[in-house]
């Protein structure tokens, strides 16, 4: 998908930047990734409060195959098709996705406990 098309699509929302990542691209606003483009499809960041809206629109999460683990889903959901023709509503959905991404980015992370190193037996 053409980066210029994506920038124009999101222009009613805010200025966005596109950065290539692996086989896809991230959609960023103010340095925060809130969208993903893969195989010509746009996905927006979602959480427990916004997923039901995506489901009502018939959207699905972004998934990929990861080695032996099989299919893995990321918290990005397909942009509903109708939003490509509704810039005002797209701006609302993009705002929500950015808010989700900002909450995730700035949320405190739980620290993992480290295992104590194995002690050697002394004879």
Image (spheres, rainbow, N blue to C red):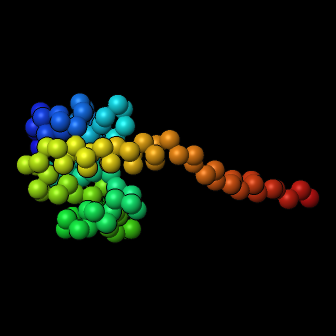
Query: What percent of the width, then of the height, locates residue 3?
Result: 15, 36
For the point 20% across and 54% down, the residue is 79
Query: What percent of the width, then of the height, locates residue 23?
Result: 23, 47
Q: Is residue 88 above or below residue 29?
A: below
Q: Nearer the viewer, residue 64 or 14?
A: 14
Q: Is residue 40 left or right of residue 16?
A: left
Q: Is residue 3 visible?
A: no
> From the image, which quarter does the C terminus lie in?
bottom right
Residue at the left extreme, as displayed = 85
Q: Is residue 89 visible?
A: yes
Q: Is residue 18 left or right of residue 70?
A: left
Residue at the front extreme, as displayed = 88
Q: Quadrant of residue 56?
A: bottom left
Q: Quadrant of residue 119?
A: bottom right
For the point 24% across and 52% down, the residue is 43
For the point 38% across and 45% down, the residue is 99
Q: Quadrant of residue 7?
A: top left
Query: What percent of the width, then of the height, locates residue 61?
Result: 28, 62
Q: Is residue 85 left or right of residue 43?
A: left
């Amino acid at each position: 998908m053409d980066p210029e098309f994506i920038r124009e699509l999101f222009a009613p929302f805010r200025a966005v930047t596109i950065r290539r990542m692996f086989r896809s691209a991230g959609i960023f606003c103010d340095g925060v990734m809130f969208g993903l483009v893969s195989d010509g499809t746009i996905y927006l960041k979602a959480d427990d409060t916004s997923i039901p809206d995506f489901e009502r629109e018939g959207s699905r999460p972004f998934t990929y195959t990861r080695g032996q683990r099989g299919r893995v889903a990321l918290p990005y959901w397909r942009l509903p098709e109708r939003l490509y023709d509704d810039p005002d509503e797209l701006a609302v959905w993009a705002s929500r996705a950015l808010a989700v991404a900002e909450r995730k980015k700035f949320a405190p992370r739980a620290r993992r406990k480290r295992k104590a190193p194995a002690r050697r037996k002394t004879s």
